[in-house]
């Protein structure tokens, strides 16, 4: 078992084969799928809500593309277009500069896999600018049992972080209640989280312990120290400027 990263998403890619099925939610212009194809020629379903990005998706072998959103409903929904197309979102409370709003088709993950006759998902990659919480909370234990692993980027820093983190923890707790192994590679943030179905990809208890110890305690503690150091340094510099009346130029 080898854990590696593709385009900021960490997963167990050597568990995939040419017969595997991958869902790329938030495909953008297809960079993740293109890099994954260099490793394994699996079947990929690329889903991108932003029409501008969808029209730029790279055409790849054994790849199907969809211009719609995945969330927790099956209807037309508002989609907010940002001046940075990759930051466009289903959520209006994101910290970005929205330039327009459109209506797009939305499907729940359950409906999407049923409509497209997808039996099992070997890797679910999620990078959907805040909609990941609604997607995962709507997934029940039956569907989760058909998913081998999930690589998800949460976007708490782009919303009201204090309100967002409890929602993320609710998602993680629900996944753990289904028997999933959850490892956060970017703690104290949540920008690279891997969820593994141990019934599909066994990881012994010793390896799980080492992964949690290293990424969620040792590295996390180091990151927290760096964060506090940078904050303290900024306060000291600002205080120095105030005392000596130094202006930014």
Image: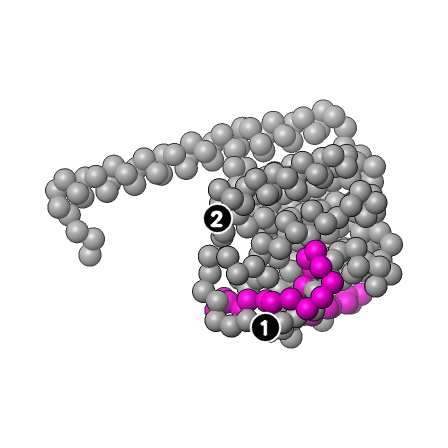
42 with respect to 99 (left or right): right
Q: Relative to 161, does residue 56 appear above or below in the rendering?
A: below
Q: Nearer the viewer, residue 192 or 37?
A: 192
For this orientation, the residue located farthest to the left is: 244
Q: Which residue is at 53% across, 61% downward?
A: 92
Q: Report the number of numbered marks.
A: 2
Q: x and y percent of residue 76 in the render?
A: 68, 68
Magenta-colored stretch includes residue 221: no
Q: Which mark is residue 160?
A: 2
Q: Which residue is at 54% across, 69% downward?
A: 81
Q: x and y percent of residue 123 in the render?
A: 75, 50
Q: Say whether residue 47 is visible.
A: no
Mark 1 crowdedness (10 Å alpha carbons): few <14, some 14-19, many ≥20: few
Which mark is first along the chain, 1 or 2? 1
- CA separation in Å, label 2 and label 1: 24 Å
Q: x and y percent of residue 70 in the render?
A: 69, 60
Q: x and y percent of residue 19 in the render?
A: 85, 55
Colouring: one colour
Q: Nearer the viewer, residue 106 or 125?
A: 106
SS for dot 1: strand
Quadrant (top left, top right, bottom left, bottom right) of the N terminus: top right
116 with respect to 90 (left or right): right
SS for dot 2: loop
Q: Quadrant of residue 15?
A: top right
Q: Which mark is residue 112?
A: none
Q: Which residue is at 55% across, 50% downward?
A: 155
Magenta-colored stretch includes residue 75: yes
Q: Quadrant of residue 114?
A: bottom right
Q: Which residues are magenta?
A: 60-84
240 with respect to 197 (left or right): left
Q: Which mark is residue 102?
A: 1
Q: Which residue is at 75% across, 56% downward?
A: 109
């Amino acid at each position: 078992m080898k854990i590696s990263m593709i385009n900021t998403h960490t997963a167990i890619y050597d568990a995939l084969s040419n017969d595997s099925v991958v869902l790329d939610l938030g495909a953008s212009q297809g960079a993740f799928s293109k890099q994954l194809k260099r490793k394994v020629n699996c079947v990929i379903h690329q889903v991108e809500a932003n029409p501008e990005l969808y029209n730029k998706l790279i055409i790849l072998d054994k790849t199907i593309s969809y211009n719609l959103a995945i969330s927790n409903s099956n209807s037309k929904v508002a989609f907010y277009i940002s001046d940075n197309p990759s930051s466009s979102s289903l959520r209006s409370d994101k910290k970005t500069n929205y330039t327009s709003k459109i209506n797009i088709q939305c499907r729940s993950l359950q409906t999407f896999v049923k409509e497209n006759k997808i039996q099992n998902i070997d890797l679910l990659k999620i990078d959907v600018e805040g909609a990941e919480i609604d997607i995962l909370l709507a997934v029940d234990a039956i569907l989760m049992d058909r998913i081998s692993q999930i690589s998800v980027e949460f976007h708490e820093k782009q919303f009201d972080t204090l309100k967002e983190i409890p929602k993320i923890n609710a998602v993680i707790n629900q996944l753990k209640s289904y028997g999933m192994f959850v490892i956060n590679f970017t703690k104290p943030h949540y920008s690279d989280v891997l969820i593994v179905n141990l019934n599909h990809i066994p990881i012994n208890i010793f390896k799980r312990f080492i992964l949690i110890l290293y990424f969620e305690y040792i590295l996390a503690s180091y990151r927290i120290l760096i964060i506090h150091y940078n904050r303290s340094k900024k306060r000291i510099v600002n205080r120095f400027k105030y005392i000596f009346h130094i202006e930014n130029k």
